[in-house]
């Protein structure tokens, strides 16, 4: 029995010794170091000034004089003198209504006026004679009063006849439709033989020599565009150049597009490559020269695309690429144009910035700059 207990004790001791020996011979391995895979990013250097492309705006050309010419009277179109596309001069006859009835009415009014004038002459003679006789005591006062009344009636009838004649002549003139300004006929809605009434549209007329560009300009730089400044433009899609002078700046901002309407007069073409600038054409105006000519501090600084900055108001941050790793940098910015900000504080001119600040980066994240 004692021998059995002794053997058990020896076995436990041996097992314990074996466990201790294995502990010393195979220590637990240290924690494995996991290599971080670099994050591929695009990086950029702040621009010292805005590119000209961001100071361009697309607009359309329109005529400063454009009209729909309508009939001023009623009647049958007896003659249509012009065609669509024809260039006309101010005062040129474009169409003629039938004037048979209006001429008769004008002749009747002329005759009525002649009769009224004759009656006025007679009444004038009568009242002058009555006044003379009354002064001599040869005519009663009542007779003079009657002559005075007759004279005033004759005056009124003559004035009425003159007005009727003027109206008849006006109706006669309205039967002739003339061009109110130099231009090109763009539409013809009626033909010879058609009956038209007052207000019926007959022609469309556009002055192709007096053109202006209407362009919506972002509110961010519209205040730097000055009235009278000359801007360069190109016609789409030909790319033919032209120049325009800023005529007016809109007084309101469009609540949807945040733009201000700018009107610029097209200057006489020096050379447009044979391409004619037409009303309705799409054009692009480059305001970079007009803005830069002001020499305002707003054109100098460090500019970044808005996507490269996480900002709330003027406070924000960027990710700077430093020794191959991401480094968060707090900056102060201001919005200058849609899609662009100017860094006022916190960034150097030579530092490289991650182009997309919304990437899930942390301080020390390994970066691989790709282009």
Image (cartoon, rainbow, N blue to C red):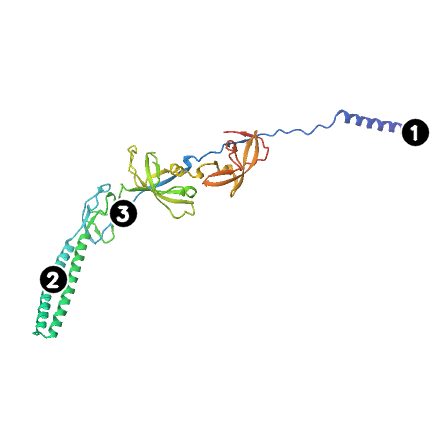
- The crowd level at tag 1 (other Cα within 10 Å; few <14, some 14-19, many 20+) is few
> Left or right: where does residue 238 sit relative to residue 38?
left
Closer to viewer: mark 1 or mark 2 = 2
Per the model, the C-alpha gap separating discs 2 and 3 is 42 Å
Q: Give SS at disc 1.
A: helix
Q: Mark 2 points at which residue?
A: 117
Q: Where is residue 49 in the image (x, y as percent from the top left)?
A: 45, 35
Badge 2: residue crowd in 10 Å (few <14, some 14–19, many ≥20): some
Residue 68 image position (x, y, % from top left): 26, 48
User: Which residue is disc 1 drawn over?
Assistant: 2
Q: Which residue is located at x 36 percent, y 41 percent? A: 59
Judging by the rendered image, the residue that carries numbered circle 3 is 67
115 to 44, vertically: above or below: below
Residue at x-position 53% and y-position 40%:
316
Residue at coordinates 83% horizontally, 26% vertically from top-left? Answer: 14
Residue 116 falls in image quadrant: bottom left
Q: Distance between the residues labelled 3 and 1?
A: 131 Å
Q: In this view, does 305 lie above or below 4?
A: below
Q: Do the residues labelled 2 and 3 touch (CB within 8 Å)?
A: no
- The one nearer the camera, 232 or 348, is 348
Instruction: First in sequence, mark 1 or 2: give its number.
Output: 1
Q: Residue furthest right?
A: 2
Of badges 2 and 3, nearer the viewer stands: 2
* Mark 3 neighbour class, 10 Å CA radius: few under 14, some 14 to 19, many 20 or more: some
Examine the rendered structure and indicate whether residue 54 appears above or below residue 175.
above
């Amino acid at each position: 029995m004692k021998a059995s207990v002794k053997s058990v004790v020896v076995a436990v001791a041996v097992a314990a010794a074996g466990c201790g020996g294995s502990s010393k011979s195979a220590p637990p391995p240290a924690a494995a170091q996991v290599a971080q895979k670099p994050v591929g990013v695009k990086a950029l250097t702040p621009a010292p000034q805005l590119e000209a492309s961001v100071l361009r705006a697309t607009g359309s050309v329109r005529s400063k004089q454009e009209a729909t010419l309508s009939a001023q009277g009623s009647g049958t179109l007896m003659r249509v003198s012009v065609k669509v596309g024809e260039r006309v001069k101010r005062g040129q006859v474009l169409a003629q209504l039938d004037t048979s009835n209006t001429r008769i009415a004008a002749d009747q009014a002329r005759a009525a006026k002649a009769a009224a004038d004759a009656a006025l002459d007679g009444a004038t003679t009568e009242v002058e004679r009555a006044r003379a006789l009354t002064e001599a005591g040869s005519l009663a006062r009542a007779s003079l009063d009657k002559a005075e009344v007759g004279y005033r009636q004759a005056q009124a009838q003559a004035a009425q006849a003159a007005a009727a004649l003027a109206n008849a002549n006006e109706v006669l003139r309205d039967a002739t439709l003339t061009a109110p300004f130099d231009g090109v006929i763009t539409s013809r809605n009626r033909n010879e033989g058609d009956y038209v009434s007052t207000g019926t549209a007959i022609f469309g007329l556009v002055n192709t020599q007096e053109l202006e560009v209407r362009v919506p300009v972002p509110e961010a730089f519209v205040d730097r565009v000055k009235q009278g400044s000359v801007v360069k433009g190109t016609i789409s899609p030909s790319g033919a150049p032209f120049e325009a002078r800023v005529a007016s700046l809109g007084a309101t901002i469009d609540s949807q597009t945040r733009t201000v309407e700018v009107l610029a007069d097209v200057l006489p073409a020096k050379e447009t490559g044979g391409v004619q600038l037409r009303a309705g054409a799409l054009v692009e105006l480059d305001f970079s020269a007009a803005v830069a000519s002001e020499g305002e501090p707003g054109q100098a600084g460090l500019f970044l695309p808005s996507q490269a900055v996480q900002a709330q108001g003027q406070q924000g941050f960027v990710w700077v690429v430093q020794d191959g790793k991401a480094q968060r940098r707090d900056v102060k910015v201001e919005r200058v144009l849609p899609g662009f900000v100017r860094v006022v504080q916190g960034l150097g001119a030579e530092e490289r910035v991650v182009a997309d600040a919304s990437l899930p980066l942390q301080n020390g994240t390994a970066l691989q700059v790709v282009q």
